[in-house]
Image: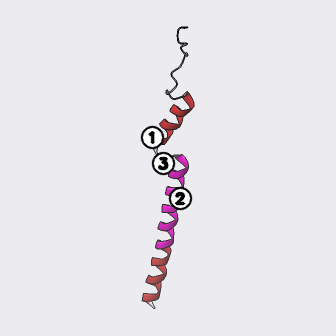
């Protein structure tokens, strides 16, 4: 009988790539692109409703 061979790494341990992926997943879906999209959407909605509000006020003045 020979002695069992040991590997340098554990078979069930995570690889560095998996750890990086898990760290990114812990942040969630919120990243710089999502933040930019959120801000631009908010600004667009604000502009749209302000312009519609001005149109309604002009109609009421007539």
Q: Residue at x 55, y 13 (%)?
A: 5
In the image, 54 versus 11, the foreground residue is 11
Identify the residue under disc 3: 30
Q: Which residues are magenta?
A: 32-49
35 is within the stretch colored magenta = yes
In the rendering, at what x and y percent does residue 42 appear? 48, 62
Q: Is residue 29 above or below residue 16?
A: below
Residue at disc 1, secondary structure = helix
User: What numbered label is drawn on residue 26?
Assistant: 1
Tell us which disc is closer to us: 3 or 2. 3
In the rendering, at what x and y percent does residue 8 appear? 55, 15
Q: Residue at x 55, y 28 (%)?
A: 16
Tell us which disc is closer to us: 2 or 1. 1
In the rendering, at what x and y percent does residue 37 appear? 54, 56
**Circle 3: is it few (<14), some (14-19), or many (20+) Cα within 10 Å?**
few
Identify the residue under disc 2: 40
Q: Residue at x 52, y 52 (%)?
A: 34
**Circle 1: is it few (<14), some (14-19), or many (20+) Cα within 10 Å?**
few
Residue at disc 2, secondary structure = helix
Distance in Å between CA atoms under marks 1 and 3: 10 Å
Residue at the outermost bottom position = 62
């Amino acid at each position: 009988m020979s002695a069992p061979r040991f590997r340098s790494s554990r078979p069930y341990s995570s690889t560095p790539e998996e750890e990086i992926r898990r760290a990114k997943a812990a942040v969630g879906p919120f990243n710089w692109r999502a933040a930019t999209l959120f801000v631009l959407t908010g600004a667009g909605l604000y502009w749209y409703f302000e312009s519609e509000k001005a149109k309604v006020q002009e109609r009421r003045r007539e």
